[in-house]
Image (cartoon, grey):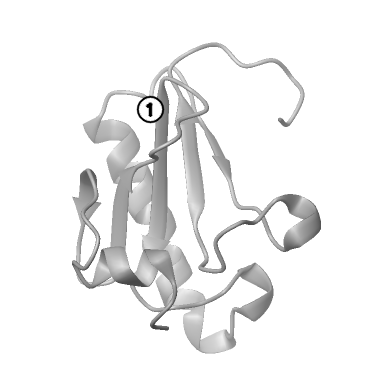
């Protein structure tokens, strides 16, 4: 997807502050962090949102969550806790049409979702 900013990051056309990368997944620090720790985790394959996942993507989604687990341990937030959010569609606040998961941590959160 040539106009997708996350695809441009995957392709190296736009720099990012990478936290994790493997053959399927890329994670980088959010440019506009909402918490002390705010990392975006994306598949390298362009998928617009959760709604666009296909049965063939089941293994990829598993790899994304395994990557989130690894990142949480690597950066030291696994024991204290963190939140994982994926906005799906305009009403949910999805601004980039590329499947992505926010890892949020670094301070105590209240019980509200957002």
Q: What secondary structure is marked by label 1?
A: loop
> Position of 96 compared to 9: left or right?
right
> Position of 92 compared to 36: left or right?
right
Residue sticking out furthest to the top: 108
- Residue appearing at x 43%, y 55% in the figure: 65
Quadrant that contains the C terminus: top right
> Position of 97 compared to 9: left or right?
right
Please state the horizontal and vertical placement of residue 9, each as a whole percent of the image.
28, 63
- Please state which of residues 27 and 58 is positioned toward the viewer in this rendering: 27
- Please state which of residues 2 and 75 is positioned toward the viewer in this rendering: 2
Quadrant that contains the N terminus: bottom left
| 51 to 28, vertically: above or below | below
- Residue appearing at x 70%, y 50% in the figure: 93
Please state the horizontal and vertical placement of residue 57, each as a whole percent of the image.
49, 80
- Residue appearing at x 38%, y 82% in the figure: 2
> Position of 12 compared to 95: left or right?
left
Location of residue 111 (image quadrant): top right
Location of residue 25 (image quadrant): bottom left
Q: Which residue is mark 1?
A: 78
| 65 to 98, vertically: above or below | above
Q: Residues within 10 Å of mark 1 (few under 14, many from 20)?
A: some
Please state the horizontal and vertical placement of residue 98, each as a whole percent of the image.
51, 68
């Amino acid at each position: 997807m040539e106009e997708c900013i996350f695809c441009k990051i995957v392709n190296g056309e736009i720099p990012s502050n990478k936290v994790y990368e493997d053959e399927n997944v890329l994670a980088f620090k959010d440019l506009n962090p909402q918490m002390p720790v705010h990392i975006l985790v994306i598949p390298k394959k362009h998928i617009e949102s959760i709604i666009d996942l296909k049965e063939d993507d089941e293994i990829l989604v598993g790899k994304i969550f395994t990557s989130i687990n690894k990142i949480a341990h690597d950066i030291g937030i696994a024991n204290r806790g963190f939140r994982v959010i994926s906005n799906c569609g305009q009403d949910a606040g999805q601004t980039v049409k590329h499947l992505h998961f926010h890892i949020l941590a670094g301070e105590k959160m209240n019980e509200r979702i957002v």
